[in-house]
Image: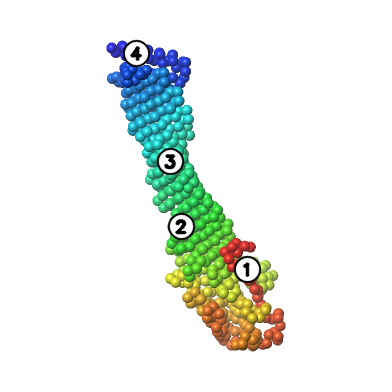
Amino acid sequence: MKYFFVLLNFLLFISQLNWSQESSKIIRIIQSGSLEKNETKYPNANILLKKNEIRVHLFHEGANIKSDKSVFYPKKNFFNAEGNVVFNQGDTLTLTSNYFEYDGTSKKGVAKGNVVLKRPDMTLETDTLFLDRIKNIAFYKTPGKIIDNSNILKSNEGTYYISQKKYNFNKNVKINNPEYILTSSRLDYFTDTKESFFYGPSKIIGKDYDIYCEKGYYDSNKQSGNFKKNAIIYYNQRIIEGDSLYFENEKKYASATNKIIITDTINNSLIKGDFGEIFKNKDSAIITKKALAINIIDDDSLYIHADTLIATGPVERRFLRGYYNVKILKTDIKGKSDSLFLDESTGKMELLMKPLSKKELQVLSSQKKTAKNPVLWFEKSQMSGETIHLITNLESKKLDSLYIFGNSFIIEKDSLSENGYNQIKGINLYGDFEDGNLKNITVNKNTEVIYYMYSDEGELVGINKTICSSIKMDFNNNEIEKISFYITPDGELKPEKLIDKNLRELDGFIWRINEKPTTVKELFSK
């Protein structure tokens, strides 16, 4: 009997060998433990069965299929196999299942029940897998799980492009990694490079970062990627948005391009621009190209523009620096300077000038030197000096005090005269606010004053020119209510016609109203 089965397998082999010479698409029978016929149940089919240790072995164009039972239809060039089915294609792809059917003409197959597809770089597990050897793809429409050396990927549908070592996942895609969890509605994943490409709502949750996008790329090995379409990164207690975002976890770095917004969730502030970079290890963010910071002060937005804005420091001690062409805008305050420093932990903002060179100190007129100083416009007043400090009360979020150091200059257009300006000049200026309104101002050292005085009927009485050690002005509803001169003031009140027009301006006077920004758009104008 043993020799009968050996002879049977030999005859089957010779038969299939001759047949295969006619067409390379014909399925070949390599061996079988036994062969049966059942024309009622399986018409025109060979029933190949395992016997003892001899399993059914079929071959087709480089693929070996082994099973415990196979029903083979020679004329149809088709078979179905069951019982510990093993499909091998070359040395790198193995497919195991409970059941497998295959068409040799179309080179398509279906594996069902405990399906496992293995390659050296990954393992796929699902319930039903479709195989197309012409397109060289395998796909499933039942929940599947892919395991590689670093990730576990799950999805409801997926297609594996065998030659490209690429998966296309659809519906409820999830990647579990010790360092992060990735979910998506659709993504492509390359098993050899561990790269993912998103084509729908996707989210990555790392140990200290969250990323959302609807189109993007992610490298699992480096935990880095580029994200687009409604992209957001939650990173280092900042929210980063932009048309295009880049993130690299190893370098603790993120960047954003075009229409970016970086929100400080702790200090209730944000920065906009067209390019930004975040350096986590340095607790810093750099924003350029239409850079704009927005802080909330006194229930109002304070806008700060500069060519470059840099936010540094931990949450509890964060600083904002602005460099070149700084402009600020708030409902009641506007300003301009070369650079800016804001300490969000103390509420102090400094407007700074660019230091003058030795040559500039020698050749520039007083007026041109004043023109380079930081300047503020508060209500109707223009205030300038070498350095300006604005202090905000952190509890009330209202302006608390104002300091100007070096060449302090206050100018206010006289409301009645055509070309008259009230002016105060000194070395340093100190001002206090109450409920966000200016309460008083004191100017010290070498103080000079030009002030237009009117009668109760509104007629010009004369122009007061005074020199004193210091002057104090009290305000009511942001208008001067009282002026006090201290320590031997020297001045006089003269009729307007007796004062030469050239003497109606203090040394260094310059009215800079054309530089005053009044809208957010004007912050960006040159």
Query: CA separation, marks 3 and 1?
Result: 56 Å
Query: CA separation, marks 1 and 2?
Result: 33 Å
Circle 3 sits on which residue? Answer: 170
Q: Height in image: 269 above or below 368?
A: above
Q: Counting residues from the N terminus, which is met first, the one under dot 3 or under dot 4?
A: 4
Query: CA separation, marks 4 and 2?
Result: 75 Å
For this rendering, which residue is in front, 278 or 422? 422
Circle 2 sits on which residue? Answer: 238
Q: At which x and y percent is residue 14?
A: 40, 13
Looking at the rendered structure, the secondary structure element under dot 1 is helix
Q: Height in image: 272 above or below 217?
A: below
Query: CA separation, marks 1 and 4?
Result: 101 Å
Looking at the rendered structure, the secondary structure element under dot 2 is strand
Q: Residues within 10 Å of mark 4 (few under 14, many from 20)?
A: some
Q: Counting residues from the N terminus, which is met first, the one under dot 1 or under dot 2?
A: 2
Q: Counting residues from the N terminus, which is met first, the one under dot 4 or under dot 2?
A: 4
Which kind of residue does numbered mark 3 sit on? Asn
Looking at the image, is mark 1 or mark 4 nearer the viewer?
A: 4
Q: Residue at x 46, y 53 (%)?
A: 233
Q: Counting residues from the N terminus, which is met first, the one under dot 1 or under dot 4?
A: 4
Looking at the rendered structure, the secondary structure element under dot 3 is strand
- Tag 4 near tag 2, CB within 8 Å: no
